[in-house]
Image (cartoon, helix red, strand yellow):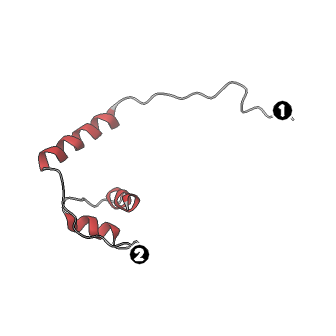
Amino acid sequence: ISHAIKYYVRIGYNISEKSDIIDAAKELSGTYLSNIQPNRTKKEVNQLDNDSEKINNEKKVNINTIPGISNLFY
């Protein structure tokens, strides 16, 4: 279910109500959702959005490969 919700958000939809979660998961076969109640306030959601933007804006660390690992020696 979490994969369907992430995909739903990635393609441009916003999840702000329980009906949005149901719409995101309705195409999954054999999945039934009931008694969905959000456990966050709008202030907490805004704080989470701000935190994720900060993480995305931080400089990424370059990862180097091990020297000689790409050379093929048979």
Mark 1 or 2: the one toward you: 2
Residue 69 position (above or below residue 3): above
Q: Secondary structure at mark 2?
A: loop
Q: Quadrant of the N terminus?
A: bottom left
63 with respect to 46 (left or right): right
Residue at 12% x, 45% y is 43
Residue type at mark 1 is Phe
Residue at 38% x, 28% y is 59
As drawn, the label of residue 30 is: 2
**Quarter of image, res 73:** top right
Q: CA distance from mark 1 to mark 2?
A: 50 Å
**Quarter of image, res 66:** top right
Q: Position of residue 45 (x, y in %)?
A: 19, 47
Residue at 69% x, 24% y is 67
Circles 1 and 2 in contact, beta carbons < 8 Å: no
As drawn, the label of residue 73 is: 1
Q: Position of residue 61 (x, y in %)?
A: 46, 28
Please identify the residue farthest to the front as the structure is shown.
35
Residue type at mark 2 is Gly
Lower position in the chain sequence, tag 1 or tag 2: 2
| Foreground residue among 67 and 20 | 20
| Foreground residue among 10 and 38 | 38
Please identify the residue farthest to the top as the structure is shown.
67
